[in-house]
Amino acid sequence: MRISRRDFSRLGAMGLAARALPSSSFAEAPGDGKVGYCVIGLGVIADHFMRAVQQSSNSKITGLVSGHRDKAERIAAQYGVPKSSIYSYEDMDKMRENKTIDAVYVALPNSMHAEYTIRSAKAGKHVLCEKPMSTTVSEAEAMIAACKLMQVKLMIGYRLHYDPLNLKAIKLIRDGAIGTVETINGAFGFNAKPNQWRLNKALAGGGSLFDVGIYVLNASRYLTGEEPVKFTGVVSTIDHDGRFDTMEENVSWTLKFPSGVLATGSSTYGAQMSGYFKVFGSKGNLEMGPVYDYSGVRLRANYEGNSPDAPRVVIDETSQDQDPAQFTREAEHFSECVLKNQTPTSPGEEGLRDMQYIQAIYRAAGVNM
Ligand code: NDP
C-alpha cells in the first residue's frame, strides 16, 4: 500500500491518518459468497437499489443507516435485516464491528457523499457511492485517498456503464460503424418541485449539471473514449419563483476532445426533458433516447453498409430490462469486484474526472463552485 504525502495531509485533516493501518476485521471475503450491503440514506434511489439487490445473485442487504428509525425498522423487516444492524448517522461508525456488512451504498444528498464514504472506509467497508461523487474536486480526491488508505474498494454508481444497450452503442462506435465521430449532442432535465435538497446548493453542490447533466457529460466521455481538453459553459435562470435562489436553472456546455470531437450538452431543472444523446459520424449516426431512464432505453442507428453495394444498416432496439435491472447489474458488478478483488469499471477516479469537468464548465460559465 503506497500512501503519498498528499494523501496523508488530506486525510490528516479528516482525522484519518492516525488510522492508516487496517485492522484484521477489514474487508474480509464474505463467507456465503454474497456481499452484504449497508444502505446509507433510505430515500428514492435506495429503494431501487434494495429491490435490485434482492434480485441479485451475489449481494444482500445486511444493514441500514437512517435518520428515521421507524422507516428503517419497517424496511429492515422487509429485507430481513436485524434491528441490531440499524444505525443512525451519529452511531454508524459502529458498523466497523458488524461482520455481516461488507460494503455500503451511499444514497445521501450529494454534499454528504464525501463524509459518509470516508467514515465507511474508516470502518473497513467497501463503498458504492451514488453519483455525483461529491460536490467538489477536493472531496472526491479525499474519498479516493481514504479508500486507498483503508484498502477498500470505491465505485461510483454510474448504472449506464453496466447497461447492455449503452455498451452496444459504445461498441458500434469503437468498431467504426458510423465512421469518424464529429459531434455529439445530448440533454437531460426535469421540472423540479420546490422545497427539496436538490434545490439547496449546500446539499446539492450546484444545479442540474450535478444531478442530471452529469449523465450527458459522462456519456460523451464513454461514447468517445476520450477525456475532454477544452470547455465552454453558460448558465441561466428563467423561472424566478424562489426555486433557483441558490443555484442556476439551466446549464449548457461544449466539450472539445483531443480527436476534435465536439460534444454539446444541456441540463435543466425547469422543463421535462427525456434524456438523449445523438452521435454524428462520417458514415452515419447513432442515438439513444430515452437513454437515462430505468427501463425502456432505446438505441437507434443508421449507417452505411460495409461495401458500396451493401444496404444501409438500420438498428432500432429497445431494452427489455425492467426496473430495477440496471441497479442489479451495477450491484452484481461491484460485488464481483469485492469477491474477486478486482477494480470496478467505474471507480472513484471516474467520478473524480466528472467533478473536474463540472468544475471546468462552471468556471467557463463564471460560476463559483
Ligand atoms: P432522496 O431525497 O429520495 O433520499 C435521500 C435520503 O438521504 C433521505 O431519504 C434521507 O434518508 C437521507 N438524508 C440525510 N440527510 C438528509 C437531508 N439533509 N436532506 C434530505 N435527505 C437526507 O434522494 P435520492 O434518493 O433521489 O438521491 C440520493 C442520491 O442518489 C443523490 O446523490 C442523487 O444524485 C443520487 N441519485 C442517483 C440516481 C441514479 O439513477 N443513479 C437517481 C436518483 C438519485 P433517511 O430518511 O433514511 O435519513
Image (cartoon, rainbow, N blue to C red):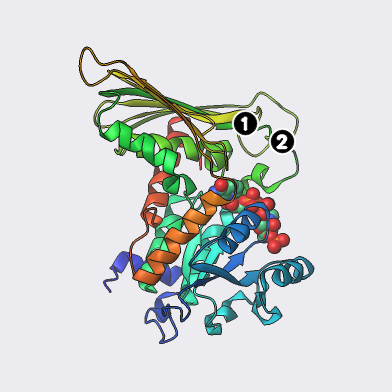
Q: Is residue 323 visible?
A: yes
- Residue that appears at 48% across and 65% down: 127
Q: Which residue is mark 2?
A: 243
In this view, 288 is above or below 305: below
Type of residue at label 1?
Glu
- Residue that appears at 42% across and 72% down: 12
Type of residue at label 2?
Arg
Q: Quadrant of residue 338?
A: bottom left
Q: Which residue is mark 1?
A: 249
- The x, y position of residue 152, in whole percent, is 40, 71
- The x, y position of residue 200, in whole percent, is 66, 45
Front one among 316 and 353: 316
Query: Would residue 136 appear left or right of 257 to someone viewing this image?
Result: right
- The x, y position of residue 28, in whole percent, is 42, 80
Front one among 204 and 106: 106
Within 8 Å: ligand 1 and the Cβ of disc 1? Answer: no
Res 188 label: none
Give the farthest residue toward the left: 307
